[in-house]
Amino acid sequence: MSIAEATEHQRRAQLVLEAALEGGPSHAYLFRGPRGSGKRAAARAFAAEILAASAEDAAEARRRAMLDPSPHPDLVWLAPSGAQHLVEEVRERVIRASAYRPFEGGRRVFVVEAAEAMRDESQNALLKTLEEPPVFVHLILLSSEPAALLETIVSRCQPIDFAPLPAEAFEAVLEGDPDEVAAAARLSAGDLELARLLLTERGREIRAEAIAMDWKGLLKAAERAGEDAEAAVREALEAEREAGAKRSAREVADEAKRAGRRRRTELLDLGLRLTASWFRDLAALAAGAPDVAYNRDRLPELGEQAAGLDPNRPRRAAELVQDTRRRLDLNVSEELALEALVVRLQRLLR
């Protein structure tokens, strides 16, 4: 896969990466953008070109670098084995390994997938490598949540931005009822993993609770998702611990709880986003513009609710939902905030 093929829907990233290869790649990059936007494929194609440029047999170096997993000795690809990157793995496979000269050619490439999953300890340890890397080393960090990275890490990398993919690109890879797939593609805002979630039973449950404005049901669904995430992370961390990872039982429990709370918060916020999208669509249909609706599989229901409705009311309702999302970011009581939102929406739309 060439750079152009890997960045088919990311023209800006394509131009920057091609220019970097032409002028000489920098020592560190941060590929940032939503999940499913093509960061991983672009990173592999970019790494393959870097390694091919200094190889005796460029085609063979490129071919091996593009394999997943790659057998190329100068390409190190680090993905988190659990909820987070293991500190020792980052130290051993990236920081210490970067001191060794290339086994082939003249360059080495280190890719850290889901860089936001590195603990602060790992990020701080990586700083010196980012500041003073050997001349033959190139680091590529991939992140869907760059805000979770230390500013000192971000400032030492050249950012490459990946925009959300167009809905049409998602529709080509998602499976299911065409109308539901079209809705998931638009409601996901360019996040392929979220689009896939919306096509699962849990995703459908969250969406149904959000459309019905059943805040109690939404909270319960988010809590169940958080409990499942906590159990899955605990199981993975326990397996790592048994395999020799240096983690105490307290660290395993704390990390699993954090993962559960994070998942619960994510799905609660998703529910509010879906509610806001429903009101956005109501305003669109009330204004006579059904073609721009996101909930493509619920057009008859939207049409019934929008009949005779002043478009300004659902627009105001969407604003109220977004305001509640901001309030939850400030750690206000979820139950009180959601109950107050439903009361205000009922008054507005009555």
Image: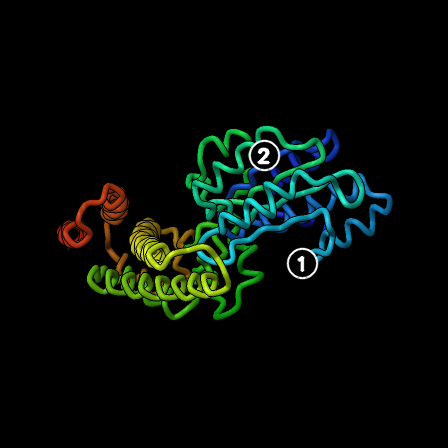
Residue type marked 1: Asp
Query: Dot 1: few (<14), some (14–19), or many (≥20) neighbours within 10 Å?
Result: few
Say whether residue 144 is visible: yes
Which element carries disc 1, helix, strand or loop?
loop
Residue position for label 1: 68
Q: Is residue 280 left or right of residue 47?
A: left
**Mark number for residue 129?**
2
* Marked residue nearer the N-terminal end (2 or 1): 1
Say whether residue 282 is visible: no
Please tell me which residue lies in front, 64 or 201.
64
| Residue 60 coordinates in the image, percent (x, y) | 82, 52
| Residue 136 coordinates in the image, percent (x, y) | 72, 35
**Mark number for residue 179?**
none
Image-quadrant location for residue 212: bottom left
Residue ID at (77%, 54%): 63
| Residue 93 coordinates in the image, percent (x, y) | 60, 48
> Which image quadrant: the C terminus?
bottom left
| Residue 211 coordinates in the image, percent (x, y) | 28, 61
Query: Dot 2: few (<14), some (14–19), or many (≥20) neighbours within 10 Å?
Result: some
Please tell me which residue lies in front, 41 or 107.
107
Please tell me which residue lies in front, 170 or 58.
58
Which element carries disc 2, helix, strand or loop?
helix
Residue type marked 2: Thr
Q: Is residue 93 left or right of residue 310?
A: right
Q: Which of marks 2 and 1 is in front?
A: 2
Q: How many angstroms separate mark 2 from mark 1 (CA)? A: 25 Å
222 vs 90: above or below = below
Residue ID at (54%, 55%): 168
Please tell me which residue lies in front, 50 or 326.
50
Numbered-mark total = 2
